[in-house]
Each structure stands twice: as C-alpha cells, then as structure tokens.
Amino acid sequence: MATAATSTQAAVPTVGQPAPDFTLASTSGEKVTLSSLRGHNVLVAFFPLAFTSTCTAEMCAITDDYDAFAAHDVVVLPISVDSTASLKEYKTKYALKTDFLSDFRRDASRAYGVLNEERFYSNRAYFLVDRDGIVRWAHVEEMNGNRRENAEILAEIAKLP
C-alpha cells in the first residue's frame, strides 16, 4: 500500500546556530554541498523564481557587485525551485556570473523554513554563513516583491571576523 509522503518545514535558522547542510545540483553541472565550503563565507540567497522581475533585478545586482562579494571571500549561492535547465537558460540570458542551485525537490527550502507552502516556491531569504558554517545574519522578506540591497548585505559581511 502506497502512502503519500508528508513533509515538515523546519524553523528559520537562528543566528549563532549551524546552518542546515544541503547538497543541490548547480548550473555548472556539479553538485554543491554547503558544508564543503567551510573556510569560506557563504551567502545563501533563496529567491522565488527565475525570469521574474524582482528576482532578475536581484540577481543582476549580485552580478554587478560580484567582485565586492569575492573581495570578502564570499561564495554566493542563489537557490530557487526552478530546474537546472531553466536556471542555465536564465544565467545565460542575463549573463549572470554566479552558478545557481536548483532546489527542485524543495528540501533546502524546507530545511531553512522558507518554503511558501501555498505557492510551492521558496520565499526570498538571505542567510550569511561564516567560515565555520554558523549563521551570522538572516533575513526573510515578508513580501517576495521586496529584496535587500547589496549595500545592506555587504555591510553585514563586513561585520564578519
């Protein structure tokens, strides 16, 4: 007898706690595991959907400031529920510098407490993870049409040891 799988969503990670680990397919064709990036600062950036206006503005801004993130040894991991094929097309169309991660099964979105259960995509959220894998800053947008400016994110990055 088959049963329907049930999923539970975790709470949003608390600042000062270890970041939930994940392994996701990337637009480079490789799988990316958060814990394998220990030794680097990481910006985990969930966004609802590729090819939407706010998400595109956000990802283009990250590309514009790519060197500023790199100067602080920050690996930017944009994550959406889109397929890797869709994200590859998105990256190419807008000449975006960073690789994108596909959370097609929504496991990472659930682990970070940001899955919009009604619409089945992730809410816009940012998690700054330090070199030891600890969440140092977290922000979940109340409305997906809003986004943080890179200046605010870079100011949080500047506070890292």
Image (tube, rainbow, N blue to C red):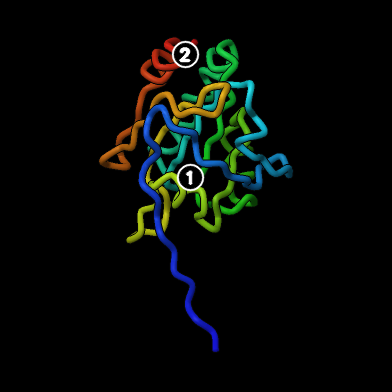
Q: Earlier in the sequence, mark 2 or mark 1?
A: 1
- Residue 35: % across, % down: 62, 35
Q: In the structure shown, which secondary structural element does the residue marked by tag 1 occupy?
A: loop
Residue in view at x 44 percent, y 52 percent? 110
Which label was assigned to residue 31? none
- Residue 108: % across, % down: 51, 48
Mark 2 is surrounded, within 10 Å at the Cα level, by few (under 14), some (14 to 19) or many (20 or more) other residues, namely some
Residue in view at x 59 percent, y 25 percent? 75
Which label was assigned to residue 160? 2
Q: CA distance from mark 2 to mark 1?
A: 32 Å
Residue in view at x 42 percent, y 11 percent? 159
- Residue 139: % across, % down: 34, 32
Residue denoted by label 1: 51
- In the rendered structure, which amino acid carries the disc numbered 2? Leu
Judging depth in this view, the residue of 103 and 91 nearest the camera is 103
Name the residue at the front extreme: 17
Q: Is residue 111 above or below residue 34?
A: below
- Residue 103: % across, % down: 55, 50
Name the residue at the bottom extreme: 1
The N terminus: image quadrant: bottom right
The reply to whether the C-beta atoms of the residues labelled 2 and 1 are less than 8 Å apart is no
